[in-house]
């Protein structure tokens, strides 16, 4: 990786929180990158509180803009054991201290991933915590900064210099000479005695200094928006606050000149050290999705080959023979099969060659196995949807129940050697059985190798206005009046506040005539798009070839669900296997109906024998009587059905 060429007047922000420090920062990556370039920065770090939620996105955004990314996180280090889940701390101690950790190389990055994961799975108590014992085992490849005013050194130097020296010795031993720095910040200068003690400790113990500014917002003008964000998180109003929650309005991304104005005369080495640290931090992530991390499918004992390609060919062969016997031959007899079985064999040979060439045999076997499990357990599974319906291999494996040749569906839309991307098969399960299938997958591949995927709720335009209005304690009706002027989402995309200002004259007029509305909009613009909270993705599940914390950071949700720290898109970019286990209420309703029919009428319905173009069924669609029918239940779709009067499945597909 090419390193930036730093000059004597350069400075690098090594202590910076993004909006992934949920409701504690207004900094978003794209505006950050723009701000850094405008101010001639060459590198920057991200150090979110207790998590690595945005590490991949940060890396990609910085690289795209020609900036050098330094990946880190601000760890909470328990003063005792991370396993101790009590609020009490030993005399003279706080329950935890902050420590900034930066990945020096790829080994350091993996150690960072491990620490951030264990902080949740082992040490969570009010917040994700690690401890010194864990740090001593996983400190290799890391650079540590002392953590500013929330660090242990700052705390100890207030009353116990010997304890501060002991703590510094421990950090030096953990990270090695040249990898531990005492952090000095402009915010410390108001506490002159402790600041002097920090500097003195560094000089007497030969520990280098590093200057930081603990950035929580881009510019000084964003300070109030940051306070509003804190109010949203704490459920209080701005008027209930006493001054700035961080102590001042100076926790922004200062320019290099501003930092030199503070420290250039007395501590120039603290500024130049930030560039040296950035040069040392050289992490390379594969974010093209080409380094696939597929779990190994457990091929049954007794099968003559250990290659997934060979086993896939065998189960596809068996699946084809089953489809031939139950579907193709009866259709040939009825004269309704479009193509000869030799055409099916040709298509299978083509698909299998592409699957093997792209290395996806294991993927198909994994999906085949858990769908087979679901069917054997009597858990209703959907017939398939999306581009996967174009695969004859998927049809023979029972992954889908749609014959792609009969409907002239293209395999290339699903899998194409010219477009290297992981196959994406969305599978619908009965809402009651979904958890059992996920549990089975976790049992088969390892509990610590399977987890659900995190997702983040963001402050969309209307929500941002409402949140700011509550924090400012504005009358509900006044805020609603403004929020309703934001046009509704168009084609699934929210209309931003800035777009609304341009498109809605009344909104622009209200801003011009009412200072309170103007402030409401200004603050909402500054927090719009920020991550507001985390939750669990409705369908996404990750399956890993080894314990997840050895590859990606993991977390636990408020409901104690095991999740990734990366969002779905970021997981795909680094080559993780993501599956969509969709819980579909429609399947549950159908299953309940079938059970009721069998109980009351003694009749069992076999779907394979039901006509797809039954006139009475098509009449229901033509009348728009499609309540609770998947994808046809909305009023708009019902109206289209009434106007179109569909007669065949192809009509419905259109």
Image (tube, rainbow, N blue to C red):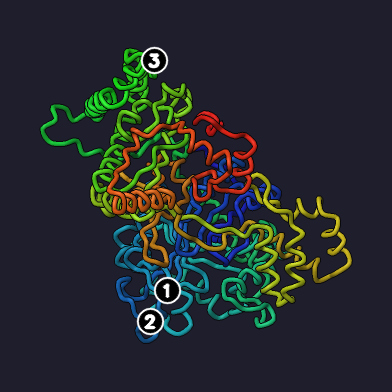
Quadrant (top left/top right/bottom left/bottom right) for the C terminus? top right
Looking at the image, residue 417 lies above or below residue 173: above
Q: Residue at x 32, y 45 (%)?
A: 544
Mark 1 is surrounded, within 10 Å at the Cα level, by few (under 14), some (14 to 19) or many (20 or more) other residues, namely few
> Is 649 situated above or below 562?
above
Name the residue nearer the viewer: 114 or 612.
612
From the top left corner, tell me how far across and down residue 376 is, in percent: 24, 44
In the displayed structure, does residue 79 sit left or right of residue 221?
Answer: left
Residue 504, percent from left and from top: 82, 54
Rendered image: mark on residue 126: 1
For disc 2, the marked residue is 87
354 w.r.t. 277: above or below: above
Mark carried by residue 495: none
Residue drawn at point x = 61 percent, y = 47 percent? 42
- The answer to whether 309 appears left or right of 586 in the picture is left
Label count reads 3
In the rendered view, tell whether residue 142 sits above or below residue 306.
below
Q: Nearer the viewer, residue 290 or 454?
A: 454
Q: Earlier in the sequence, mark 2 or mark 3?
A: 2
Q: Position of residue 419 (x, y in %)?
A: 48, 27
Query: Alpha-carbon neighbours of circle 3 within 10 Å: few (<14), some, or many (≥20)?
Result: few
Question: Does the residue at mark 1 contact the one at mark 2 (Cβ under 8 Å)?
Answer: yes
Circle 3 is placed at which residue position? 339
Please tell me which residue is depicted at 37% across the width and 33% down the height of the picture: 401
Q: Marks 2 and 3, Cα distance to the nearest angstrom?
A: 71 Å
The answer to which of marks 3 and 1 sits earlier in the sequence is 1
Residue 507 seen:
yes
């Amino acid at each position: 990786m090419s390193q930036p060429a730093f000059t004597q007047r350069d400075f690098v922000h090594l202590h910076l929180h993004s909006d992934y420090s949920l409701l504690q920062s207004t900094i978003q990556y794209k505006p950050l990158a723009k701000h850094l370039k405008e101010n001639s920065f060459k590198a920057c770090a991200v150090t979110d509180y207790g998590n690595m939620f945005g590490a991949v996105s940060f890396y990609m955004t910085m690289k795209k803009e020609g900036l050098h990314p330094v990946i880190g996180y601000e760890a909470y280090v328990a003063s005792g054991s991370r396993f101790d889940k009590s609020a009490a701390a030993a005399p003279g101690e706080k329950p935890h201290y902050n420590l900034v950790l930066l990945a020096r190389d790829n080994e350091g990055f993996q150690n960072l991933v491990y620490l951030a994961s264990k902080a949740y799975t082992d040490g969570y108590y009010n917040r994700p915590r690690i401890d010194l014992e864990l740090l001593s085992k996983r400190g290799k490849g890391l650079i540590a900064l002392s953590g500013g005013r929330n660090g242990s050194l700052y705390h100890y130097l207030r009353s116990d210099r010997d304890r501060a020296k002991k703590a510094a010795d421990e950090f030096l031993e953990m990270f090695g000479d040249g990898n531990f720095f005492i952090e000095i910040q402009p915010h410390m200068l108001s506490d002159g005695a402790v600041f002097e003690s920090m500097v003195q400790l560094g000089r007497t113990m030969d520990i280098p200094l590093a200057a930081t500014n603990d950035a929580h917002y881009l510019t000084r003008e964003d300070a109030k928006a940051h306070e509003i964000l804190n109010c949203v998180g704490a459920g209080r109003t701005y008027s209930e606050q006493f001054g700035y929650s961080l102590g001042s309005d100076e926790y922004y991304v200062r320019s290099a000149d501003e930092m030199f104005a503070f420290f250039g005369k007395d501590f120039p080495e603290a500024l130049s050290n930030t560039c040296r640290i950035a040069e040392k931090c050289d992490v390379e992530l594969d974010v093209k999705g080409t380094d696939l991390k597929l779990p190994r499918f457990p091929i049954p004992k007794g099968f003559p080959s250990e290659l997934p390609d060979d086993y896939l060919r065998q189960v596809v062969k068996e699946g084809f023979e089953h489809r031939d016997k139950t579907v193709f031959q009866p259709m040939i007899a009825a004269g309704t099969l479009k193509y000869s079985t030799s055409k099916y064999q040709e298509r299978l040979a083509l698909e299998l060659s592409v699957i093997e060439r792209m290395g996806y045999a294991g993927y198909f076997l994994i999906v085949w196995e858990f769908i087979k499990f679901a069917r054997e357990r009597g858990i209703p599974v959907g017939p398939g949807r999306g581009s996967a319906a174009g695969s004859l291999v998927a049809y023979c494996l029972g992954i889908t129940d749609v014959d792609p040749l009969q409907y002239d569906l293209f395999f290339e839309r699903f899998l194409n050697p010219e477009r290297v991307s992981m196959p994406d098969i969305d599978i619908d399960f009965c809402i009651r059985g979904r958890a059992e299938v996920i549990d089975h997958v976790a049992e088969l591949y390892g509990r610590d190798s399977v987890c659900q995927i995190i997702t983040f709720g963001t402050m969309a335009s209307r929500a941002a206005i409402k949140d700011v209005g509550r924090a400012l304690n504005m009358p509900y009706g006044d805020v609603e009046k403004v929020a309703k002027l934001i046009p509704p989402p168009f084609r699934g995309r929210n209309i931003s506040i800035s777009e609304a200002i341009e498109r809605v004259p009344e909104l622009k007029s209200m801003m011009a005539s009412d200072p309170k509305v103007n402030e409401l909009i200004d603050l909402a613009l500054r927090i719009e798009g920020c991550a507001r909270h985390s939750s669990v993705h409705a369908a996404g599940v990750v399956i890993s070839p080894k314990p997840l914390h050895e590859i990606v950071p993991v977390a636990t949700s408020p409901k104690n669900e095991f999740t990734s720290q990366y969002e779905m898109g970021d997981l795909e970019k680094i080559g993780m296997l993501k599956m969509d286990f969709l819980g579909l209420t429609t399947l549950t309703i159908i299953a309940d109906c079938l059970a009721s029919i069998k109980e009351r009428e003694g009749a069992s319905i076999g779907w394979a024998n039901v006509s797809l173009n039954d006139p009475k069924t098509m009449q229901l669609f033509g009348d728009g009587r499609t309540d609770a029918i998947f994808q046809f239940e909305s009023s708009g779709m019902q109206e289209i059905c009434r106007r179109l009067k569909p007669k065949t499945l192809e009509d419905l597909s259109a």
